[in-house]
Image (cartoon, grey):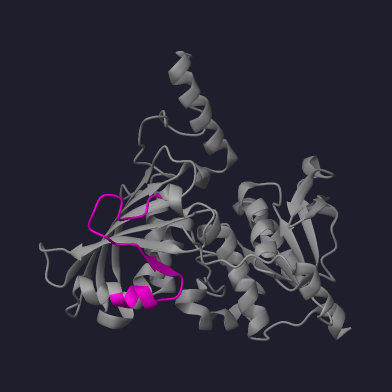
Amino acid sequence: MAGIHSHSSNLDTKRSNRIMGYKVAIAGATGNVGREMLTVLAERGFPADEIVPLASRRSQGSEVSYGDHTLKVRSLDSYDFSDTDICLMSAGGSVSKEWAPRIADRGCVVIDNSSAWRYDAAVPLIVPEVNADAVVDFTRRNIIANPNCSTAQLVVALKPLHDAATISRVVVATYQSVSGAGKEGADELFTQTRAVFVSDPIENRKFTKRIAFNVIPHIDVFMEDGATKEEWKMVAETKKILDPKIKLVATCVRVPVFVGHSEAVALEFERPIDPDRARDILREAPGCLVVDKHEDGGYVTPVEAVGEDATYISRIREDPTVENGLMLWVVSDNLRKGAATNAVQIAELLVNRKLIQPKREAA
C-alpha cells in the first residue's frame, strides 16, 4: 500500500543547496520511538545539518542509523544544548520532567513524546493536521507536547468530521499493539508466543496477564472511577487538542499485535452527516487515507499500516441506534503517526512558519 511520507534519496544534495540547517538532538535515541524519529527525519528530508543521538550513560557509544549514516550515541547527562535548535525527546516521563525545562532554558525547543507536559496549560499539545495554529504558544515554556499514540490517530480522523457536523459524543474501543509498551512489550509477546508453541512456561513481566493469543483490557494504572490512565489520557487530550465540549469515553485494550493501533469509534453529531459525505470529507482531509470497500479485505488492518504515516479509515457506516451517528474503524502505525512522525511534523511546523531560526546562522 502506498504511503504518504516522502522518501528522500537526495538528502545530501538538498543539504548542499542550503545556507545553514538546524542542529537536532534526539533524547532517547536507542528506544523504539527514538530510532523511528531518526528514520522519519531522514525520510522526510528535514533541514538538519547535524543530528545528535542522546541516551543514558549506559548506551553511550552505541550506534544508531540515520539515513545512510551511522551515528554514535552520546550521553544526555553531559551534553551541552546551547548550540542545539530542537530536541526531540522520547526518554520517558520522569526524564522529561527533569530535563525538558533545563534543555528549554538553554534556548533549545523541546518536542516531548512523554505524558509529562501534555496537561500543562502553558504547553501546547499539537497534532499538526488538527491544531497547528496552537504551536505559537511554545514560547511560554519552550516545550511542545506530543499526544498519546491512541489520541493522535483518533483526532486526525475526528477533526474534519467535527468541522463539518460538530461531534458531541465519542465512544471508542482501542486495540493497541505491544510496541506501545516499548521494547519490553514486543519482547514479551515474542517470548510468550514461542513458549506456547514449545510448551515452555509462560512468564508475565511487562503485562498483567499473558498477552500471547490473548487481549488485556488494561493499559496504564487504574484510577478512582474505574477507568485506566490510558483511557483518561484519550479524554483529556481530545478535549485539549480538538474541543473541550466533546464528551468521550474509551476502553483501551492491549492486543497481540507488534505494531499498529486500531480503534472502533462510535460518533454522535449535532447535525446530520451520512456515510457518503463523511467518506468524501475524510478523503480530502490532511493525514487521512480512506480504504472502505464493503467486501472481503476492503479495509485496513495494522499490518498494512506499519511504516506509513497515514491515519487509515475504514468501515464508515451509519449508527442506527442514535440520531446523527456514524461508526468508523481507524488504524495507524503507533510508532510513526502516534509518536515519531508527529514529533517531526511539529518540528517542520516551527521551521516552515519561521518560528525558530538556526542558532549558528543567527550567530
Decide if residue 244 is in sight here. Answer: no
Query: Which one is in front, 169 or 276?
Result: 276
Residue 105 image offset from top left, x and y in percent: 75, 71
Say above or below: 124 vs 7: below
Apparent side of residue 298 relative to residue 356 in the rendered image (left or right): left
Give the tally of numbered discs: 0
Say above or below: 198 vs 354: above
Q: Residue at x 57, y 36 (%)?
A: 184
Apparent side of residue 18 relative to residue 246 in the rendered image (left or right): right
Apparent side of residue 157 relative to residue 321 in the rendered image (left or right): right
Query: Which one is in front, 358 or 219?
Result: 358
Residue 260 image offset from top left, x and y in percent: 46, 50
Q: Residue at x 40, y 64 (%)?
A: 236
Residue 83 image offset from top left, x and y in percent: 85, 71
State which quadrant residue 196 falls in. Answer: top left
Residue 12 in the magenta stretch? The answer is no
**Magenta stretch mostly in which secondary structure?**
loop
| Magenta residue span | 280-301
Residue 344 image offset from top left, x and y in percent: 62, 67
Q: Residue at x 22, y 58 (%)?
A: 294
Q: Residue at x 10, y 62 (%)?
A: 321
Say above or below: 185 vs 85: above
Determine the residue located farthest toward the right in the rendered image. 363
Apparent side of residue 157 relative to residue 270 in the rendered image (left or right): right
State which quadrant residue 150 falls in. Answer: bottom left
Residue 295 in the magenta stretch? The answer is yes
Quadrant of the image for the C terminus?
bottom right
Decide if residue 241 is in sight here. Answer: yes
Query: Which one is in front, 32 or 296?
Result: 296
Query: Which one is in front, 19 or 163?
Result: 19
